[in-house]
Amino acid sequence: LQHATVAIEDERFYEHNGVDLEGITRAAFENLEAGEVKQGGSTITMQLARNLYIDDPERDLERKIKEAKIAEEIEEAHSKEWVLENYLNTASYGTVNGRTAVGVEAASQIYYSKKADNLTLAQSAMLAGIPQAPSLNNPLQNPRSALQRRNEVLEEMEKQGYISESEYEDA
């Protein structure tokens, strides 16, 4: 689940200091080209900063600057493992029957009725795909979209060397 999350959310997670300038630049160009905000450029650490410290965030430049500053401070004070663990425990994984899954353990219980430690590769990839768009990628409410997103996660995992081609095919 950790590898799946890094692969789909922040492939340079282990290389940056909380802010991925390459990712932000890529997102800015894609947004300019599209004429609207389509890409965010946030790192896992920036998302954690938002989850922990920014109330009712608006999608604007001021928020992104705050996130970036807090993300750098978080990374100065904590290990990558701490950042990833806390992100996984604070991310939103959608709402099912009025129950909102905050954190991977809650999501694992809601979607699969099992502990996160017992998830299969395919189930882990499914959960890792949810936070980007929790309603759209909810496997119970939008199974087709969730399956497509899961497959994107698996493809990124294979491309980045987290899983082999045969593990990708099996999942």
Image (cartoon, rainbow, N blue to C red):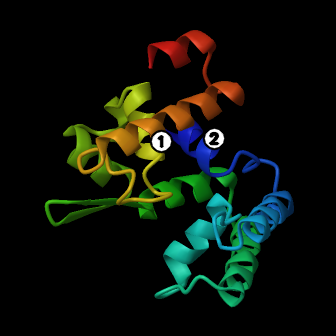
Does residue 19 appear anywhere in the picture?
no
Q: In this rendered view, identify the residue nearer to me: 113 or 93.
A: 93
Q: In this rendered view, identify the residue nearer to me: 11 or 144.
A: 144
Residue 41 coordinates in the image, percent (x, y): 71, 64
Q: Is residue 115 left or right of residue 113?
A: right
Q: Which of marks 2 and 1 is nearer the N terminus?
A: 2
Q: In this view, does 84 lie to the left or right of 68?
A: left
Q: Is 122 located above or below residue 144 in the figure?
A: above
The C terminus appears in which quarter of the rendering? top left
Q: Which quadrant would residue 89 be assigned to in this image?
A: bottom left
- Amino acid type of the residue tagged 2 in the rendering: Ala
Q: Residue at x 76, y 48 (%)?
A: 12
The numbered mark at residue 80 is: none
- Amino acid type of the residue tagged 1 in the rendering: Arg
Which residue in the structure is indicated by mark 2?
A: 7
Label 2: element kind:
helix
Q: Which residue is drawn at 82% across and 65% down?
A: 29
